[in-house]
Image (cartoon, helix red, strand yellow):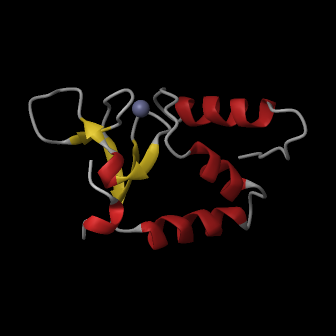
Amino acid sequence: MVNRSETSDTRIVYGFFCSWWGGIEEAGQHHSKTSNLPGCPVCGNGLMQVDDAKTWWDGVDEKEKTIPGYKDFISWLKGKCYYGADGAGFRAALAVYNAKPGRKQVVV
Ligand SMILES: [Zn+2]
């Protein structure tokens, strides 16, 4: 694994079938093992991408305007894989996040 500062590849990648997200340097191998495609380092499923952290956080900030607490939730979610198609993984992660006593509830 390379450090983010040692690469010009600034992509932020996130799960297509799971909730995982992180820098491209944190990605693992796609579970198919038939290509060099990156995958979630936990479940191996495919990843989507944005060009850089600014693009990622700009999108998160936009969501925060209508979903209070969304940015804190996404910050917490980094590196966590909750698997599930059609947003099920994301919803499972949100349920775990919201289940912590005293935490401000995030309603998506
Ligand atoms: Zn995953």
Q: Is residue 54 visible?
A: yes
* Name of the residue lying farthest toward the left: 34
Which residue is located at x 57 percent, y 37 percent? Answer: 90
* Name of the residue lying farthest toward the right: 102
Q: How far from the left and from the top, in percent, is residue 56?
A: 48, 64
Image quadrant where residue 45 sits? top left
Horizontal relation, residue 88 to residue 108: left or right: left
Q: Is residue 11 visible?
A: no
The residue closer to the viewer here, 45 or 100, is 100
Asked if residue 73 is positioned above or below residue 32 in the image, the reply reads: below
Asked if residue 61 is positioned above or below residue 102 in the image, the reply reads: below
Horizontal relation, residue 67 to residue 79: left or right: right
Which residue is located at x 70 percent, y 63 percent? Answer: 64
Which residue is located at x 53 percent, y 46 percent? Answer: 78
Q: How far from the left and from the top, in percent, is residue 62?
A: 63, 69
Image quadrant where residue 35 sits? top left
Q: How far from the left and from the top, in percent, is residue 25?
A: 30, 52
Image quadrant where residue 60 sits? bottom right
The residue closer to the viewer here, 38 or 62, is 38
Counting the numbered discs, the total is 0
Ligand 1 quadrant in view: top left
